[in-house]
Image (cartoon, rainbow, N blue to C red):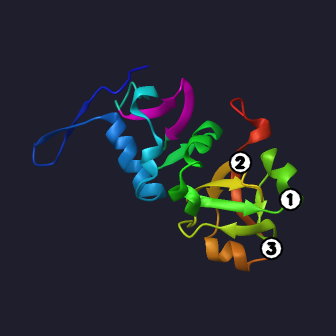
Amino acid sequence: MITNEGYVLLTGAGQVHSILPIRKLAMTLDYLFGRGVSKSVRAENTGFTYSRKTGRIRQIFMDDKLFATFRSDGSLALTIHGARILIINQLFKSNLVMVTDEARSHISEGRSVFARHVLEAGERIRPKAEVVVIDRKGELLAVGRAVISAKMMLRFKRGVAVKIRKGILNSLDG
């Protein structure tokens, strides 16, 4: 694992820019989850792994645990550990989906969130956005991708609202 080493970005005009991986992570977090969310990330405990083929950042580690993985489209796939770090930040609240107690156990096992179980949904949630699912107490249940927008989650009574990738009960770092 390589920690906080810079890499070179070549632009179309032949200009060379050096970007630190921690800076790229901060810009990506702020873009995806809202300005200021990156303040949750501490540079001293952050490490990266890179693709051997492309040299791009593939995985981000914090405190020696996987925080997130960069997707090929430039977005992040959060882990349970990553969600625990970000959920503390007040600015991240607009990326949360709160569900009923009735659905709590199923979601924490990794099953999808249905629209009828959504109590609240953050205003930044759009289809395919990375979201964190919590219960009424604010406890983390799962991480996944929104299937529909926040407005639709609250209006619809049928259908999948969030496709869960990892629940706290089926997570190695949970």
Foreground mark, 2 or 3, reads: 2
Q: Amino acid at mark 3?
A: Arg
Q: Amino acid at mark 2?
A: Leu
Q: What residue did someone put label 2 on?
A: 140
- Residue 159 location (% of width, % of height): 77, 69
Q: Is residue 32 magenta?
A: no
How crowded is the residue under tag 3: few (<14 C-alpha within 10 Å), some, or many (20+)? few
Measured Cα–Cα span from mark 2 to mark 1: 13 Å
Q: From which residue to which does the magenta span run? A: 56-69
Question: Looking at the image, can residue 72 be seen?
Answer: no
Q: Please tell me which residue lies in front, 68 or 36.
A: 36
Quarter that holds the N terminus:
top left
**Disc 2 or 1, which lies upstream in sequence?**
1
Residue at 53% over, 66% down = 124
**Rendering quarter of residue 93:** bottom right
Measured Cα–Cα span from mark 3 to mark 1: 18 Å
Residue at 71% over, 75% down = 154
